[in-house]
Amino acid sequence: MAPMKAAPMRPTAKFSISFGLVTIPVAAYNATDTSASVSFVRIHTADGGRVRNQPVCSLEGVEITPDEIGRGYKPGDGDTVVPLSDEDLDALPLPTAKTLTILAFVAGGDIDPLQMGKGYYLGIDSPAAAKPYVLLREAMERHQRVGLGKIALHGRETLAMIRPMEGALVMQVLLWPHQIRSMDGVLPERQAEVARNEVSAAEALMDSFGELSEDDLHDHYRESLEEIVAAKLAHREPEFPAGEEQPAGEVMDLMAALQDSVRAAKRSRGEDEEAGSGRTAKKSTAKKSTAKKSTATKAAAKKQTAAKKTAGRGGRRAG
């Protein structure tokens, strides 16, 4: 049986990238797939019936159809809502509605990770866009910079970052700076002090983690949830592989916990077990050798003492 082919991606938006006087028509494709994540539906716990969200008019109290739903904007804190049609939105004097104008090129590390939102793959939207597309990508790769600009997507203007990735251009939607909340009340009033040896132990623990494995990148939560569902349908108990129980509770001795963590991480990868036993064997052999030398030395000393005493007694008899 031939494997099923993945459905071709469809662009979610089309616009142009403005790079100085260079224009690059592109199509944006969703770079992430949220359908693969775990999702739940709401049910009525009494009988298991689905609980749905029905669009109801707040004035008439009746359910309305999707064709009757439009957009409205609520200015200020009042109850007034101003209706807005598609024509009103199309008339907005926004150059970002059709064009992403690059405003600056910055180092990627200058972007606050808290601002990063949804990602899009950018593909060319016409054969003529191929050369300027490659030009922008290679220039950013060699210059080690990312482009910052503004674009209107899905009725909202947003900041956007463009960066090269594996031969393509990727756009990352960014939150506005004012959308990042203050950290007031997050940090403790009194900062804890840590010793230098504790920081060194924490660094040793970081080094002991190693690289990510394929199993680390596996969605075990979804797999376990599907096993619970299958068990309920089959009227049986769920079967889970036995896992190592994680220690819980408050850490009282931080240094000891760090050192134990390093040893546990090495044991999990089978490191230093054989080497450790080898060192122990060598130390044991060295101790035995030292003990033998000490015993031999003491025996030789006793023989020398006995010989001297015998020689002394012989000399007195001769006299």
Image (tube, rainbow, N blue to C red):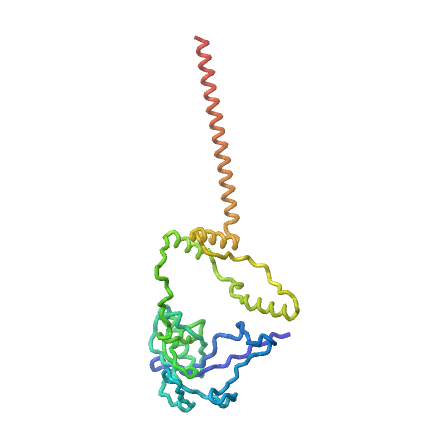
Residue shown at the point (38%, 51%) measured from the top left = 197
The residue nearer to you, when weighing 146 against 75, is: 75
Q: Position of residue 156 (x, y in %)?
A: 40, 82
Residue at 59% x, 78% y is: 49
Query: In the figure, is residue 301 to the left or right of 140?
Result: right
Residue 20 vertical position relative to residue 215 in the rendered view, above or below: below
Q: Which residue is situated farthest in the bottom direction here?
A: 87
79 to 259, vertically: above or below: below
The quarter of the image holding the C terminus is top left
Q: Is residue 228 left or right of residue 267?
A: right
Q: Quadrant location of residue 116?
A: bottom left
Tell me the quadrant of the picture where the N terminus can be found.
bottom right
Q: Nearer the viewer, residue 261 or 83?
A: 83
In percent of width and height, residue 69 lies at 48, 88
Question: In the image, 97: left or right of 239?
Answer: left
Percent coordinates x, y for residue 110 in the rendering: 35, 69
Say if 44 sits above or below 301 in the image.
below
Q: Residue furthest top?
A: 319
Q: Nearer the viewer, residue 103 or 153?
A: 153
Vertical relation: 317 (above or below) 51: above
Tag count in the figure?
0
Which residue lies at the image location 35% right of the left edge and 68% below the top edge? 184
Residue 246: x percent and y percent?
Answer: 52, 57
Q: Nearer the viewer, residue 30 or 127?
A: 30
